[in-house]
Amino acid sequence: MSVLRGRWLLAPGVFWLVAFFAIPVAVLAGTSLMPRGIYGGVTAGFTLEHYSRFLDPLYLGILARTLLLSAICTAICLLAGYPVALGIARSGRWKNLLLFLVILPLWTSFLVRTYAMIFLLRDHGLINETLMALGITSAPLHLLYTRGAVLAGLVYGLLPLMILPLYTSLEKLDPTLLEAAEVLGARPLSRFWRVILPLSLPGTIAGCLLVFIPSLGAFLTPDLLGGAKDMMIGSLIQNQFGPARDWPFGSAASVVVMVVVLVAMLGWLRRRPEVL
Amino acid sequence: MRRAPRSIVALTTLGFITMHVPVLVLAVFSFNRSRYGASWEGFTLDWYRRLAERPDILAALKVSLVVGGLSTAIATTIGTLFAVGMTRGPRRGAAWLESLVLLPIVTPEIVMGIGLLALFATLGIALGITTIVIAHVAFSIPFVIVVVRARLAGMDRTLEEAAMTLGATGRSAFLKVTLPLLWPGIIAAALLAFTMSIDDFVITFFVAGPGSSTLPLVIYAMARRAVEPSINAVSTLLVAASTLLILGFDRLSPRRGS
């Protein structure tokens, strides 16, 4: 019996998550405060230089671009995802199939899905070949390695994360409220603005966070779909741990990302929807 | 509930096309005879046949399966114990435990990846299959917990209490009543953990060492070099595997829409 008591059941999980999640994040925070060693590692000491280096317009520019792209991506996902969530909530017997089709892309390789975008967008990809075959363009458009391609890749990859919490909110919406609004004379648009939208606010907030946070840390998408000028903070971090070999600066950049994430999460943790 | 207006149906359809067409196109062209263009030049299985002749792909497949199997077994065990433990133990510290489960889910993958890399470097642990398994277990556990806990929440606790009233010890009530009822949730969690493991790129990218490339790492290296039909073929296989696993997961999960 004593083996089955909560504490012992929790111990292995707590150990693993502390040792291989909490401590790694703490190690990053520590690394970001130490001077850089000769071979990219760290030496003993304390410094804030990696953070002050972040104030360089070059890096602030990358941070600003990342925040902007993530915000645009979130806005597009919200606009595109809302009708889809509404459509699923009212799809009757198709509901289970449609929900499965929203969940499926989340669990298929993000890498493969990003590669699928390369396949579509490249100079001799399907989009360009089709446009030229139809005589709409005479030469291939340069779609790949642009900021638009990064945005398309992010929206394509993250759209399901917006739809799911929105759906959860809309599904719970009591239809009699809409009927009441209708009986009281509200037109469809006004029913949407004054009943549906306010009641789906928790799902909207959750969806926006679920899209915004991963796009903030994206590195695969800008790496494969973007050009040299489209570096996002994820690519900057990867670069510091890869070719640039400046781990303390890379750690500082990732601490900045974590701080933004935590700030975004703070308000949400208290009233989190059951979607996760 | 009332039917959706036609405009909503149209936008919903458009949404689903956006979410699924790119990968479908990728899969269709894995059977295309043409090497370069995006024009259809006839059906072939050549690109799949060639995959079987590539030692790097076969080695990566083996690494992916070993890592997937090990990390799924460990994460499912630890996560299930944790989920059961959360429903018993004292409620003290529950909020802290919730955060410990939730934070890894919402932390950007790159932060977790480089954090683990920095930890392994600090401890002087060589990168390889072991470090990949450790990382995969770490990112899978929270999802296992969420899935198993959902199953536990939908379960009738009184059954276990009834077994104990009828004279079963706590241990045998758990093993003979609770565990069998929990199985579908545990299997669903394992399918999810395995899917996440074989698909993960970002975290694996940072904690893999020489000679321990998983399939996604090989696909990435190929995709950076050039666009070639072999990438379509191996990608299609990976997506097909995930789809089957998630289909199984979905079957075992309680219905969402009612």
Image: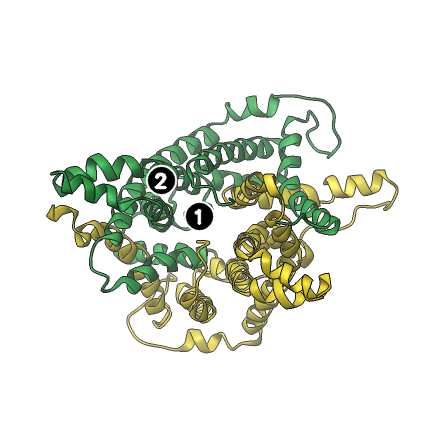
Chain colours: A yellow, B green
Relative vertical location of residue A12 with respect to residue B238 in this rendering, above or below? below
Are the residues flagged by discs 1 and 2 in contact, CB closer than 8 Å? no
Crowding at mark 2 (Cα within 10 Å: few <14, some 14-19, many 20+):
many
Helix, strand or loop at label 1? It is helix
Separation (CA) of disc 1 from disc 2: 30 Å
Q: Is residue A217 visible?
A: no
Residue at 52 percent of width and 54 percent of height: A168
Q: Does any portion of residue A49 appear in the rendered image? A: yes
Q: Position of residue A8 (x, y in %)?
A: 17, 51
Residue B184 sits in which quadrant? top left
- What's the residue at 30%, 44% (across, down)? B156
Provide the secondary structure element on which disc 2 rests: helix
Which residue was labeled with disc 2? Answer: B185
A13 or B80, nearer to the observer = B80
In the rendered image, residues at marks 1 and 2 fall on the same chain: yes
Q: Is residue A14 left or right of residue A209?
A: left
Q: Which mark is residue B205?
A: 1
Q: Point out residue A198 in the picture as x, y percentages from the top left corner.
A: 59, 67
State which chain disc 1 sits on. B
Q: Amino acid at mark 2?
A: Gly
**The disc labelled 1 sits on which kind of residue?**
Phe
Q: What quarter of the picture does the N terminus of chain A occupy?
A: top left
Q: In front: mark 1 or mark 2?
A: 2
Residue sitting at x 55%, y 44%: A99
Q: Is residue A207 above or below residue B226?
A: below
Closer to the camera, A70 or B156? B156
**A249 left or right of A88?**
left
